[in-house]
Amino acid sequence: MKYQGVLFDLDGTLIDSAQDMYIALNLTLTEVAFPVVSYTQVTTWVGNGIEMLVKRALSGDMAVNPELPSSLVIDAVARFKNHYKQLAGDYVALYQHVETGLAATAHLPKAIVTNKDRIFTEQLLEKLNLTSHFRVMVCGDDGEKKPSPAPLLKACEALNISPEKAIMIGDSKSDIIAAKSAEIDVLALTYGYNQGFDLKELEPEYLCDGFLDIIPIINQQ
């Protein structure tokens, strides 16, 4: 087979998780006396880890305010993590056909490569009964985050496959850039959290509108 292993992003690829983060963010912002944000804003800010998400919320914009006090950021991140731990998984849903797609590619070893912290990644996978599908998890607090190629290469090493025999499946600019830097083929899904980027412009090897579309690509000889 062309591919011997598959690397999956989590948020926006396998699961629609913005609602939990939206609620936890607004609880945090209220506690630190900052304006609440909209659900739509949150969906455009997801993808670069918790600290960046909180900084964007405090700034009220994708571009982070460079004058945010570090003490405020530290406090807000801690508050967010506390709220998110209580909420993570309560309002999350699998995207359509994810279970079917994972089952249809059960013969290939799989890894989660996410910028989300490990504690929340494990919590979400367990709540959604996805844990058994993945042999490896590389999370945002394990080291470098995407768009660095390092977490993808770490996942390949843990799966004992060479990068040229792997494929990365994600929904964002960070996924595509990380895969290209690691010289790993990348399949971009159009339905997730793409932060307003036209993913086609980033020239992924494959661009798909639905999760079922990945099956013939992953299983090609």
Image: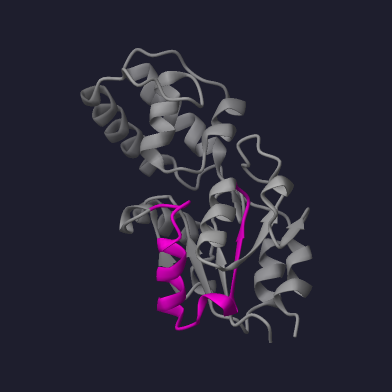
Report the front residue among 84 and 65: 65
Judge by depth and name the residue closer to the eye, 163 or 87: 163
The image quarter containing residue 168 is bottom right
Q: Visible in this render: residue 8?
A: yes
Please state the horizontal and vertical placement of residue 180, each as a whole percent of the image.
57, 60
Instruction: Residue 154: say if magenta.
Output: yes
Instruction: State the image quarter where residue 213 is shown.
Output: bottom right
Q: Verify whether residue 167 appears in magenta.
A: yes
Residue 174 placement, left or right of 53: right
Magenta range: 145-172
Q: In this view, does 155 lie to the left or right of 106?
A: left
Query: How many marks can you see?
Result: 0
Name the residue: 24% across, 28% down.
75
Work out which quarter of the rendered image holds the N terminus and state it: bottom right
- Compared to residue 103, the image places residue 129 above or below, namely above
Residue 191 visible to the viewer: no
Which residue is outermost to the left? 71
192 shown above or below 196: below
Q: Which residue is drawn at 31% across and 57% down?
A: 143
